[in-house]
Amino acid sequence: MNEEKTTYSGLFVIIAMAYVTCLLISNLIAGKMWAVTDQITLPAAVVLFPVTYIFGDVFTEVYGFVRARLIIWMGFFCSFFAVAMYMLTIALPHPGFWGNQEAFAVVLGTTPRVFVASLIGYLFGEFSNSMILSRMKVATGGDRLWMRTIGSTIVGEAFDSFLFVTISFAGTMQVKQLVTMIVCQYLFKVIFEAVCTPLTYGVVGFLKKKENIDTFDYETSYSPF
């Protein structure tokens, strides 16, 4: 089936909400660093952020690029709004008896550089992931879902990891440390996606059957706007 539905089903809305929730939580916990080894440090968000790519794969595979594009932009604007509210609440004057201002600012605060890096990495990563999966689906006639999900993730996560880490930390650490962070973060995310492939198959199969839809983007414009 390749016809565009004019309404959004309950399942679509539920998955969209879960996607945005994972994205917002990932942005919130990204400030915590995870010491994997003495030489390897990753942002704690790597334990959750790859899930957004699984959701992205599901949206594109089942509903098509147009619907996936809507969700990607929804995640972008929700993230922007969340950070704006964090900055506003941090800036509000606090009473003298409340001694948690510094801790509150450390947990919820971010620098403009890191914020811009996260948004740029997110947009390039998510859109490239969705576009590649969509084109691969048409090229393979809908076969070999595993190849499409992992292949698109390999490209999408490369954009996201490189852009986010480079824009955020270039000039603040040695090149070797920068490269190590990019590579380790990238590999972790791709392996995460590969391990979750059976789950992706299950969710995609359930949705296609329940929604009675399997979109092929034969004549879709891949403009992000």
Image (cartoon, grey):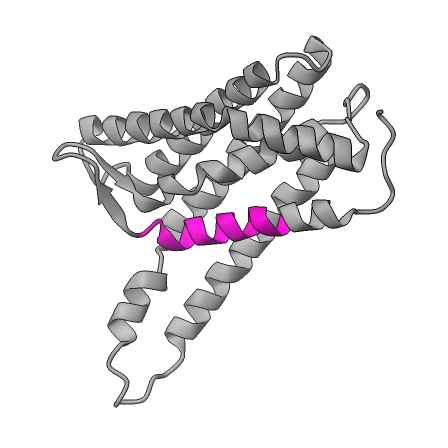
**Outermost residue, left side:** 38
Horizontal arrangement in the rendering, residue 132 relative to residue 170 (left or right): right
Residue at horizontal 31 percent and vertical 52 percent from the top: 31
> Which image quadrant for residue 89?
bottom left
Between 160 and 150, the one nearer to me in the picture: 150
Q: Is residue 99 above or below residue 16?
A: below
Based on the picture, tell me whether residue 23 belongs to the magenta stretch: yes
The C terminus sits in image quarter: top right
Magenta region, residue range: 16-31
- Report the label total: 0
> Which image quadrant for residue 40?
top left
Horizontal arrangement in the rendering, residue 163 relative to residue 16 (left or right): left
Secondary structure mostly seen in the magenta stretch: helix
Residue at horizontal 31 percent and vertical 25 percent from the top: 183
Q: Is residue 222 above or below residue 38?
A: above
> Which image quadrant for residue 111?
bottom left
Between 8 and 163, the one nearer to me in the picture: 8
Between 202 and 56, the one nearer to me in the picture: 202
The N terminus sits in image quarter: top right
Horizontal arrangement in the rendering, residue 204 relative to residue 39 (left or right): right
Q: Is residue 60 above or below residue 101?
A: above
Residue 189 image point, x, y percent: 40, 30
Residue at horizontal 44 percent and vertical 41 percent from the top: 49
Residue at horizontal 61 percent and vertical 18 percent from the top: 145
Residue 205 image point, x, y percent: 68, 28
Residue 52 image point, x, y percent: 52, 39
Based on the picture, tell me whether residue 100 belongs to the magenta stretch: no
Residue 163 image point, x, y percent: 41, 33
